[in-house]
Amino acid sequence: MNLGNMFSFMETAEGLCGTLAPVWTIFGYIIFAIKVVVPLLLIVTGMIALAQAVMKQDEKDIKKAQGILIQKLIAAVLVYLVITITGVVVGLVMGGNADWKGCAKCAFHPFDTSCGITGGSTGDTSDYGQGTPSGGQDQNPAGGN
């Protein structure tokens, strides 16, 4: 078994990131959901707990719920910042490697038109996975000659 043939897909013009752009985009959607939904859920549940304590009109429960809300607010900010800082660090580590920057872009900015699951920047499903995640334009976006 020739190991060179196993990694021949990395030598294509699109490279590994171009081939796996849909996977990186799905990963990006998951990261985005965590970045947005988790902090919102933490804040909403903390506010509900505080509202329930206020309805009981017990000073001890209100103080406890305030403490919980503050902890959840801090956790929400940390979740958001950890993902944001990770994206910045990954972008810096990528350096000048445009192919891997494309992977990072699709992972941390999945709504970019060049990272679409439906196929590159054209949205045409016939070129599924043929997008240019490095930020360039497709060679033939109209699909004609």
Image (spheres, grey):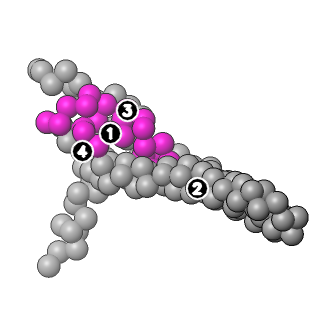
Q: Amino acid at mark 4?
A: Gly
Q: Which residues are magenta?
A: 100-126
Q: Are marks 2 and 1 in contact (CB under 8 Å)?
A: no
Compare marks 2 and 4 and give the one earlier in the sequence.
2
Q: Who's the residue at 26% across and 28% down the image?
A: 122
User: How far, Cα to Cα, is label 2 from label 3?
Assistant: 28 Å
In the drawing, what numbered circle is on residue 41?
A: 2
Q: Which residue is mark 4?
A: 129
User: How far, Cα to Cα, is label 2 from label 4?
Assistant: 33 Å
Q: Which residue is mark 3?
A: 113
Q: In terms of depth relative to the viewer, which is nearer, 18 or 35? A: 35
Q: Amino acid at mark 2?
A: Leu
- What is the x, y in percent for residue 75? 70, 62
Q: Residue furthest bottom?
A: 1
User: How far, Cα to Cα, is label 4 from label 1?
Assistant: 8 Å
Left or right: 42, with 145 as reference point: right
Q: Are marks 4 and 1 in contact (CB under 8 Å)?
A: no
Q: Are marks 1 and 3 in contact (CB under 8 Å)?
A: yes
Q: Amino acid at mark 1?
A: Gly
In the drawing, what numbered circle is on residue 69?
A: none
User: How far, Cα to Cα, is label 1 from label 3?
Assistant: 6 Å
> How dense is the environment of label 4, judged by Cα within 10 Å: few (below 14), some, or many (20 and up)?
many
Left or right: 28, with 46 as reference point: left
Q: Residue furthest left?
A: 145
- What is the x, y in percent for residue 106? 42, 46
- Quadrant of the image containing the N terminus: bottom left
Q: Amino acid at mark 3?
A: Thr
Label 1's element? loop
In the drawing, what numbered circle is on residue 116?
A: 1
